[in-house]
Amino acid sequence: MKFAFLISMLVFMFPNQKQRVFLIGDSTMATKKESDAPETGWGQVLHLFFTKEIEFYNHAVNGRSTKSFRDLGHWKAVLENLKKDDYVIIQFGHNDSKMDDTLRYAEANTDYKANLIRYIEEIRKKEAIPILCTPVNRRKFDSDGKFVDQHGDYPKVVREVAKSLFVDLIDLHSESQMILETLGEEPSKNMFMHYQGGIFSKFPNGITDNTHFSPFGAKMIAAAFCKLLVDKGHPLRQYLIKSAFPNKYQYEVPLVYEPYFRKDTFDITRYGAKSDASFINTSAITNAIDIANAAGGGTVFIPSGLWITGPIILKSNVNLHLDQGALLQFIDDRSHYPIVETTWEGQKAFRCQAPIWSVGQSNIAITGKGIIDGSGQLWKSVKKSKLTDSQWDQLVKSGGVVEDKTWYPSEQSRVGNATEWAKKLTPGKTMADYEMVKDFLRPNMLSLLECNNVLIEGVTFQNSPAWTLHPLLCNHTTFRNVHVKNPWFGQNNDAIDLESCRYGIVDGCTFDTGDDAITIKSGRDEEGRKRGIPTENIIITNTTVFHGHGGFVIGSEMSGGVNNIFVNNCTFLGTDIGLRFKTTRGRGGKVSDIFISDINMSEIVGESILFDMYYAAVDPITLIGDKKVVSIIAAKPIDDGTPIFQNFFMDNIQCKGANSALLMNGLPEMNIKNVNLTNSSIKSERGIYINDSDGVLLQNVSIYHKTGSLLNINNSKNVTVDQIKFTNGTTQTIQINGDQIRKINLIRKKGEAWMMDVNMGKEVNKKEVKY
């Protein structure tokens, strides 16, 4: 007892010392006052990427140089507080170059260099540790869109001093240039102070500043600092926060820019809108949007009430806000929806204009707590097998046309469905041809093409004609607390399809729909490959799916590629498949670097996790009267149409109830590569099937299945099963088949009884299997 007391007293008297880090520099690094919003220094947000075991003291000051920071007493305050093993991060250069300012000017190769050396010597005298940063770049591009460096010799001098004095160097100058060049001239504005007037109180007339950072830009530079720490193997990397995603630090998780809007409000009733079941408000809402856009932006306000409208077009700097109790009902009259050139399932096509449509706009939003109804019943065909008898009888009595146990809303709809050229842009066909099948050309509900800085928040979308939310070729899209509700029998009623989009987040949403719920796409076949724009840097988090073909889905239209996707803390309830990755020969494209964690599933009808490289565009679950045939396909030559699945990392996947725990169907000529499933538990009818795969790790995985073998491995390589768990007290079977079996490693916990029968086909080289 006395010993325990002494230990507790020692802990109280000498708590764990936190690592201290001081920052000295200029305004690009400095912490800002609230009244300076939105200006943000990168040092102000650096702590967001580190654990609480480190303390940051940001002494950077606006307008300071290596000379003025010392002369004005800022350095003295830091130096007096320095202790052994503290770090000091130094970044100057922006103000040292001001030749007309004698208080700040320090010529790069003389005074600036001498000042840096003096700081380093004084830091080391205190037994602290200096870190030199080259100055971050200003944003400047020439008339040809080429980046222009404005820092002269200053970055070079920092590099020389770091090398000569053996100081750790963080080259933010080079890294920030790479970031700016990668983003490009227009998108890089998001990193800096580019805002219209009427948004922030400090800048009533707006601001254009290519030196100082927005909150988004500051985080980008802070993340770049962390990246360079890791690249150098610097000791401070041990304090970096690990993200919720497997094998990723927090700084590696994509950052998404959110738009800001002027405070001006444009109430649609001021422009003639009426809450009346027989009044069409298309003109009033359009006028409000146009006037708000012309005024520089603001909020178009839809108050509580029923508002009937035809299709509307969103424009830049406008936030369409639906008040609590507002129902925006799109008219159930096809004559209001003109045929436009757009896309359908990854290919160019003629379709009717989307109820909400926007092309080439920036800073747009739909927010609020209202409901948007797409009048999907006007457009959708329905299979008899998806309805009860009474529902089917009622639907048929409503009108329309029936053929092959499918109901169509009109004869045009039936003809269009049977006409192949109607499904895409077909040479030789004119607009008049497409008018003949207009009823078939159902639109997606929200269609955003080549839009940047999009916010969709709080609203409910229901009864979509086809896909519900479809951003295509968009950058920086945020979907937060959005609800999608479609009838479960709705074909092509995906909840959200992010196609060839970069930097996006889906957060806190709920989806209940008739097709795939959360879907990542990037174009189809040769057309998608020619477009060549992947969907990348996307976050899906805190989202629930109540019904859908797939909870989270990639494909099958993924010909432009998919990479760097992060999925975390999602729940799938009763979906046909949980995690669904689908493609087929002819698609081409590479899906890579997919990070998934903390997924909870219940009562999944089919596979908990499915990799399917033989996707045939049919329902994942066989319907009544349908037959599902599994093809046996031989290897084919690899070409541009050969798809690639690789680098999937899944951790803490929990599933109560599924047909199969995991099914991987790779191609014999292109195996599914490098898939990790760790720390997971799945209760299912059947076990795990690994076919034509290379590099599979199952580690600390529990499978509780009822029938068949626990694990089936066919023609696969480099498969490691490390401490797989199963129903207690039962002997399980591992079945291994195929003449392509290579390096199968079955690992059990040391000292644990081996309760598995390993059965191998005659064609298997038994030396390739270790257990």
Image (cartoon, rainbow, N blue to C red):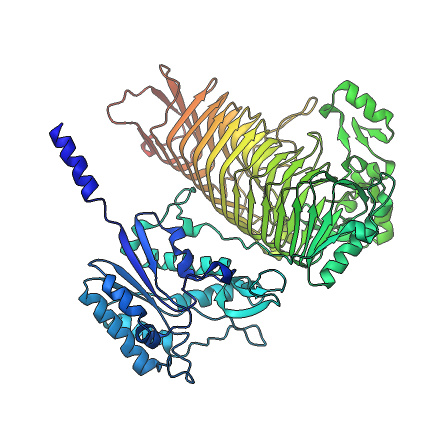
Q: Return the residue nearer the eye: 251 or 687.
A: 251
297 relative to 681 in the view: left or right: right
At 86% from the left and 28% from the top, the residue drawn is 398
Examine the image and state in which quarter residue 326 appears.
Answer: top right
Name above or below for residue 559 compared with residue 85: above
Question: Which quarter of the figure is the N terminus placed in?
Answer: top left
Q: Position of residue 474 (x, y in %)?
A: 62, 54
Can the viewer see residue 339?
A: no
Determine the residue located farthest toward the top in the rendered image: 729
Question: Which quarter of the figure is the C terminus placed in?
Answer: top left
**Number of numbered discs:** 0
Name above or below for residue 260 compared with residue 68: above
91 relative to 597 in the view: left or right: left
Examine the image and state in which quarter residue 127 appears.
Answer: bottom left
At 57% from the left and 31% from the top, the residue drawn is 577
468 relative to 136 in the view: left or right: right
At 63% from the left and 27% from the top, the residue drawn is 628
Q: Return the residue nearer the eye: 92 or 725.
A: 92
Q: Return the residue nearer the eye: 677 or 589.
A: 677
Q: Position of residue 272 (x, y in %)?
A: 84, 51
Determine the residue located farthest toward the left in the rendered image: 2
461 relative to 165 in the view: left or right: right
Q: Position of residue 165 (x, y in %)?
A: 23, 71
Q: Position of residue 757 (x, y in %)?
A: 36, 20
Can the viewer see residue 516?
A: yes
Examine the image and state in which quarter residue 613 appears.
Answer: top right
